[in-house]
Amino acid sequence: MKKRTDYKVSGGNVFKDLDVPSADEAMTKAELAARIAEIIGRRKLTQAAAGEILGVDQPKVSALLRGRLTGFSTDRLLKFITSLGQDVDIVIRARRSTKGRGHLHVVAA
């Protein structure tokens, strides 16, 4: 006999699904941190070497790579990305729907 498991399909933002305050900002920070971790990994940087590039100490790099993002603003994460030699383009466009708020998405090219 199969055991029934109840679940809820995600709306695309796990933070909203979990009713986290400032869910859009939390998702944006998580996406930026994931991109930073990807760049650090691809370049095979140690946490200490990454810290020198980012202008922070190794424990802060460790926290960032582990997803502990308290104390890291979106602006600071964007500065980290540019410090790692990446360009950041910000595009503002009208929503397809006129209802509700706009959304912020991080897209890696």
Image (spheres, rainbow, N blue to C red):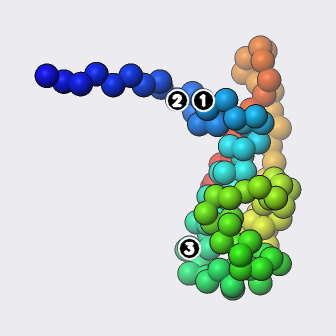
Q: Residue at x 47, y 26 (%)?
A: 9
Amino acid on which the number 1 mark rests in the picture? Asp
Q: Residue at x 81, y 53 (%)?
A: 74
* Pointer 2 residue: 10
Is tag 3's residue or tag 2's residue first in the polypeptide sequence? 2
51 with respect to 6 (left or right): right
Residue 81 at x, y = what percent? 75, 65
User: Dot 1: few (<14), some (14–19), or many (≥20) neighbours within 10 Å?
Assistant: few
- Labels 3, 2: front one: 2
Left or right: residue 65 versus residue 55 is left
Instruction: Name the residue that disc number 3 marks.
Output: 41
Mark 1 or mark 2: whose residue is earlier in sequence: 2
Q: Secondary structure at mark 3?
A: helix
Please tell me whether residue 96 is drawn above or below residue 19 in the rendered image.
above
Residue 7 occupies which quadrant of the picture?
top left
Disc 3 residue type? Gly
Q: CA distance from mark 3 to mark 2?
A: 28 Å
Report how far apart the C-alphas of labels 1 and 2 lie in the structure. Answer: 6 Å
Could you say which quadrant of the image residue 19 lies in? top right
Which residue carries the number 1 mark?
Answer: 17
Amino acid type at circle 2 is Ser
SS for dot 2: loop
Q: Nearer the viewer, residue 41 or 69?
A: 69
Location of the N terminus by quadrant is top left
- Name which quarter of the figure residue 65 lies in: bottom right
